[in-house]
Image (cartoon, rainbow, N blue to C red):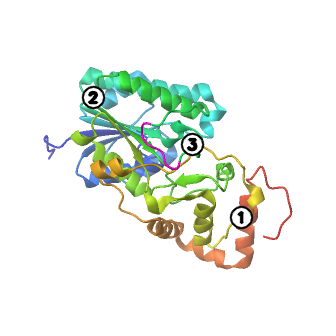
Amino acid sequence: MTNYNTPKVLLTGAFGNIGQHTLEALLHKNYAVRAFDLDTPDNRKRARKFNTEVVFGNIVYPDAVTDAVKGVDAVVHLAAIIPPKSEHDPNFSYTVNVRGTRNIVKAMKQHGTAHLVYASSVAVHGCSHHRPCLSIDDPFEKTNCYTEQKITCEWELDQESIAKTILRFGAVIPLERKPDPLMFEVSLDAKIETVHPDDAALAAANAVLNSKAEDKKYFIGGGADFQMTYRQFLTRALENLGIGMLPDTAFSDDLFHTNYMDTAEAQHDLKFQNHSFQDFLDDVRKAQGCGIHLLKIPFMRSLVRQNLLKLSPYYTQTESL
């Protein structure tokens, strides 16, 4: 039997990295959730894990968005094109990231939806390593198509009369992450603040229809335990998997758009920082399943290291692996 007093939430990008964790968090809080994402074989497979309403569609189509928003009390908008894909096709990413968000806002105004939780990024502050720690009111800096699009969305949302909460996420590293060339595009000296995916998801879920969070902007990071240089992060992450740190020559010297963040107000209002960095490492190992034991074999460890280094555009030297 339907409980008509239960708030209903539309979650876009429901089957992405943060999306799946957020879907779990919303269901755990007993929200009625309408999950919205692209109709792909992978998403259909992921959808079968959840006992909730699922609508397949694309946020670039206004009619699909209008139908998806109808009857919900709040929207958690996670759907986006992120780097490096956003940089390969700027026009397409603009259509998804900016026009798709406009479609969400227009549909919310049409249906009188109460609250929007919008996923932005710490990347909107650009290369900010000269600052010890970012404050939420620090200036924006456009560094690529993605940051320009997120800045545009934040600026446009500021002009809208709807109630909204903007979450600027730090680095949300998937527990089951496939190797990506992007890992080599960050300087080992860069400051980075990560966050456990479950904590990032809880922040989004706890922002929904939260009067404290209405019309506020927050940084979503793991806190002091998750603040470290990229070298420290990778060393701990790769040693945790039994792979070991990779040569310095494999990495760019670009400080990238990451930094430590002041998450005090976010934690006060959203109460989401429940995991330590060691918890994150432990959960990554669990996510690898039995395959983690193969890396104890020297040949397999060497093979994995070689395959990782093939992804680096900077690694040209022949070194001992």
Q: Residue furthest right?
A: 318
Name the image quarter holding residue 9. Answer: top left
Which of pointers 1 and 2 indicates the residue nearer the eye?
1
| As drawn, 35 above or below 215 | below
Residue 128 image label: 3
Tag 1 secondary structure: loop
How far is mark 1 from mark 2, CA to CA?
50 Å
Q: Nearer the viewer, residue 291 or 117?
A: 117
- Label placed on residue 76: none
Label tally: 3
Per the picture, the main secondary structure of the magenta-coloured stretch is loop
Q: Residue at x 80, y 55 (%)?
A: 315
Callout in the foreground (3, 2) = 3
Q: Which residue is found at the position 33% from the left and 24% from the top?
A: 107
What is the x, y in percent for residue 166? 38, 37
User: Residue at left 37%, top 49%?
Assistant: 22
90 or 269, which lies in front? 269
Residue 105 sits in which quadrant? top left
Residue 51 in view here: no
**Residue 133 belongs to magenta span:** yes
Q: Amino acid at mark 1?
A: Leu
Give the labeled residue for mark 1.
Answer: 246
Q: Mark 3 vs mark 2: which is more N-terminal? A: 2
Q: Tag 3, which secondary structure?
A: loop
Disc 3 to disc 2, how far (Cα)? 40 Å
- In the image, what residue type sits under mark 2? Lys
Q: Could you tell me which residue is drawn at 58 percent across and 68 percent down?
A: 236
Tag 1 and tag 3, C-beta contact below 8 Å: no
Judged from this view, the residue extending furthest toward the bottom is: 297
Looking at the rendered structure, the kind of residue marked 3 is Ser
Which residue position holds label 2?
Answer: 70
What crowding class fits label 3: few (fewer than 14 Cα within 10 Å), some (14-19), or many (20 or more)? many
